[in-house]
Image (cartoon, coloured by chain):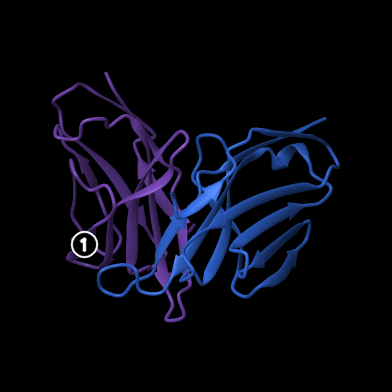
Amino acid sequence: DGGITQSPKYLFRKEGQNVTLSCEQNLNHDAMYWYRQDPGQGLRLIYYSQIVNDFQKGDIAEGYSVSREKKESFPLTVTSAQKNPTAFYLCASGYSLAGGYNEQFFGPGTRLTVL
Amino acid sequence: QKEVEQDPGPLSVPEGAIVSLNCTYSNSAFQYFMWYRQYSRKGPELLMYTYSSGNKEDGRFTAQVDKSSKYISLFIRDSQPSDSATYLCAMSAIGELTGGGNKLTFGTGTQLKVEL
């Protein structure tokens, strides 16, 4: 059964704690992405990785960190430096074609709440 | 000004109605245009993508692109309660990411409710 899995589905964090969100894919995609979704703001790109052992900052990377040690896995750590971490976090994997087409497949998301 | 503008709704229609969802954009470098559907508390799923100006049909869904006006639409015919979701438009230009990859820029989403 191919797809993208994210865990946990719900996560509660106390202020000052780091938490790590898991993302795994078995679609054999080279590229993986992390987005944050807030009401009224759409999806904003946090980090992306186009190949193993390489990743780049997206539009809102401050307070987040990632690693890409395996093709299948792209975990996201929300650090205590992220000022407003409560949000719905979406992981995606996909591919880009030379003509500009970029298809991304999304996981089910993790809802993070800071208490 | 945001690169992609989308009316957030909510949009409420009776079952069987034709629904029109729209996005405007300012970046003329966008080449591909996509529509995603997102059910509450779920990840988005790709509905359709288009490249050229004109219409593309898939069952009850029609995607329309007007590059000269920088305007895209998604039409849903014979709408069903199961179509109740948030619809996100997304657009892609060539090589906007470091390393040459293509980036998706999303609208904020339109919330649709189809009522019995």
- Residue B15 position (above or below residue A95): above
Chain letter, colour purple: A
Which residue shows up at 68% across the image and 38% down it? B84
Chain of the residue where label 1 is placed in the rendered structure: A
Residue A80 x/y as whole percent: 14, 32
- Residue B76 position (above or below residue A17): below
The secondary structure type at the circle numbered 1 is strand
- Name which residue type carries label 1: Phe
Residue B30 x/y as whole percent: 48, 68
Q: Which residue is mark 1?
A: A55
| Horizontal relation, residue A10 to residue A81: left or right | right
Mark 1, other Cα within 10 Å: few <14 / some 14–19 / many ≥20 = many
Chain letter, colour blue: B
Which residue shows up at 78% across the image and 60% down it? B59
* Near-viewer residue (B39 or B96): B96
- Residue A94 position (above or below residue A109): below
- Residue B106 position (above or below residue A103): above
Q: Residue furthest bottom?
A: A98
| Horizontal relation, residue B87 to residue A1: left or right | right
Q: Name which quarter of the figure residue A90 lies in.
A: top left
Residue A52 x/y as whole percent: 22, 67
Which residue shows up at 55% across the image and 43% down it? B109
Q: Residue furthest top?
A: A115
Which residue shows up at 49% across the image and 45% down it? B43
| Horizontal relation, residue B32 to residue A25: left or right | right
Residue A37 x/y as whole percent: 41, 40
Q: Would residue B113 be seen by someone viewing this image from the given angle?
A: yes
